[in-house]
Image (cartoon, coloured by chain):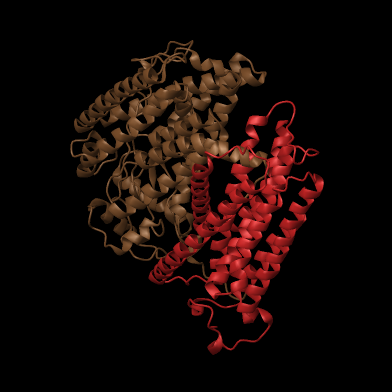
Amino acid sequence: MTVAAGIGYALSALGPSLSLFTAVISHKPFLILILLSSTLVWLMSLIALSAVWRGFIPFKTAAWWPYALLILTSVASQEALRLFLWRLYKRMEELLDAFADRVSKPRLVITDKMQIALAGGMGHGVAHAVFFCISLLTPAFGSATYYVEKCSRIPFFLVSAMIALAFVTIHTFSMVIAFSGYSEGNRTDQYFAPVVHLAAGMLYMRSVPILKFEVSIAISEGVSSTTLLEIREDILIFRRCPHLQGIPIAPKNRVSPTEDGSLAAGGPSAYDYHLRLGPKFTGAIIIVTQ
Amino acid sequence: MEQNPRPRSVLETLGEEIIRIVTPVSICMLAVVILVSILNGDSSSRGDLPITTMATIAYSESSSDSTWDKLKGALLNSLVFVAVVTVVTFLLVLLFYLRCTKFLKYYMGFSAFLVLGFMGGEIALLLIQDFSFPVDCITFAILLFNFTVVGVLAVFMSKMAIFVTQAYLVVIGMLVAYWFTLLPEWTTWVLLVAMALYDLAAVLLPGGPLRLLVELAMSRDEDIPALVYEARPVINDSGPSGGVVRRRVWREERGDTDENQGLSANTRSGLASDSTPGTHLSVGIGEHERNLADAEEGRVTGGDSELTTPLIQHINVRMNSSENAVPSENLVLEGIGLGSSGAIKLGLGDFIFYSVLVGRAAMYDFMTVYACYLAIVAGLGVTLMLLAFYRKALPALPVSIMLGVLFYLLTRLLLEDFVVQCSMNLLMF
């Protein structure tokens, strides 16, 4: 695999997250810290998983159930991690609000919370892409490339890059959805993340050699989850901020019950720009690049 | 479209201090990893060349020894190294006590010259060789000389643009770290752990040399002459000119030419003695840096970061710096990195040893590099949090190095096989 091809694989796995990073996360140091910590936490969960499964790999049998068990345990542990992160996030939110009160800045609004969830999810996604795709590229520089039997028409690295791309998207946005589901108590939102995660994980372990079809399924999976998430995100935000719907808001009923934080500190109109730009912009980037 | 400017949320300024330190550390690590993969990747047999340095004086590792022999030899090497470092640090304390500050500053400049000129020149030659870059001797000599002299001036004079100073400090750290990665493997790892333990002892124990140095400096209210990376101070809403003016006033008030005291002074005493294969240049003790985090000086006692506190208050804060002068409210404020107008300083030795760890991990595989990078950044964050909590001199090495070594071992032994097997079977989660 040439260096140019390697860079191409790396960019195709991490391109959208790079653009998301520069657009949203890189301006706020706190989000960068959240990204790094969630990457670390995902890595720790992966190490724990590998400690458990290390003795059994490589699987000697060709049966499908060990693989299914592996996927099941991995997804279960990561979803448990998501719950744990939610608890931590609640604690951190209180600290941040108290801190914001102390320095007389506005409290966390809904976009801030979503951005924190986005950064956390992206940490997971980037960790997946880095450890499952990018770290396998560097030993393979040189002449020739590598194919696996399961998908023997495309180089293995391209397959893993595409899958990593799908998973980055899934991780990033399912964190946003899960957090908003937990905060609102919305059951569909809460179950969305584990179901999609499990489905995506199970998708590739079929040992039937479907070759390109499989990869296209992966991509469509990623796209569909993305679009679904984008729509959901927009709906979520749209629902919460009546001032976006063109409803004229008198000053005294400006504070909606779902929004905590002092809106008195700034005008409501200031949020329009960020809200409208944020999700659609990033969604457009992702869909275009896919 | 917007009628009023949006009030800046807490997220936009929180943690900025930490990011301003993490970024140059990351850049240094990245540079070392790139150097290691370019220069050491081609000739993996080069690692067996006998490099006689201070760090391998007791035992020269060769790949035919048994594991136990290697471990013993590595322990001996690190003991010798730590002993030499301790002696040199005590010497530094003595010189500082006898007020030979000028001598120390000249020595710092001299060591910077050696690192940039000779080590930098050698690495540049290796790179030119690798890439067959067409350049003649005279041009190369002129460029190298200019580069070195500007670097020495950047280290010496504090009136240089801060970006140039920062860049040169990162380059010096990178060069020394690359040299350290040339040591044999077991020696490197044991040395890292030994330096972390030494750091812990030297800073926290009552008789430790670094603690003595910090107390001396504080009692005399002077700067310690050392190679220290200083991040730009976080100025909130007061514009760049305000910050610059504040720095100038600090410096003129002090009257000496060293860098201004920042939020936390993290300096370390390390040494780099070397004789590279081929050139029998035996440099003595290299840089002196100290590994402390000095929490008192330069902190803003005002509660609100957006007010521009008057200059005189800053100076008073510095003059009367003591451990418990600041109310506990500001602990949270400065602890998370928000609202302080001082700058965080990190000693160059920390840069060097972090990069050595990551560079050595790069010699195995890149998966260990990513894992160790995350571990080191996490350790750095934890250290900064502890710094804000305890508000006294803290060593920056132990947490990061221990986490880094732990993650390296875990990744190499457990994670790598697991991930490779899962990927090959397209088991992704």
Quarter assignment of residue A135: top right
Residue A80: where, in percent of width, then height?
A: 51, 59
Residue B359: where, in percent of width, then height?
A: 50, 31
Quarter assignment of residue A117: bottom right
Residue B44: where, in percent of width, then height?
A: 56, 19
Vertical arrangement, residue A224 with respect to residue B134, above or below: below
Q: Colour of chain A?
A: red
Vertical arrangement, residue B186 with respect to residue B164, above or below: above
Which quadrant does the N terminus of chain A fall into?
Answer: top right
Vertical arrangement, residue A15 with respect to residue B106, above or below: below
Q: Residue at x 65, y 39 (%)?
A: A61
Q: Can residue B129 be seen in this view?
A: yes
Q: Is residue B284 visible?
A: no
Q: Residue at x 41, y 49 (%)?
A: B381
In this picture, residue A183 sits left or right of residue A245: left
In this picture, residue A152 sits left or right of residue B15: right
Quarter assignment of residue B306: bottom left
Residue B210: where, in percent of width, then height?
A: 26, 36
Near-viewer residue (A216 or B99): A216
The brown-coloured chain is labelled B
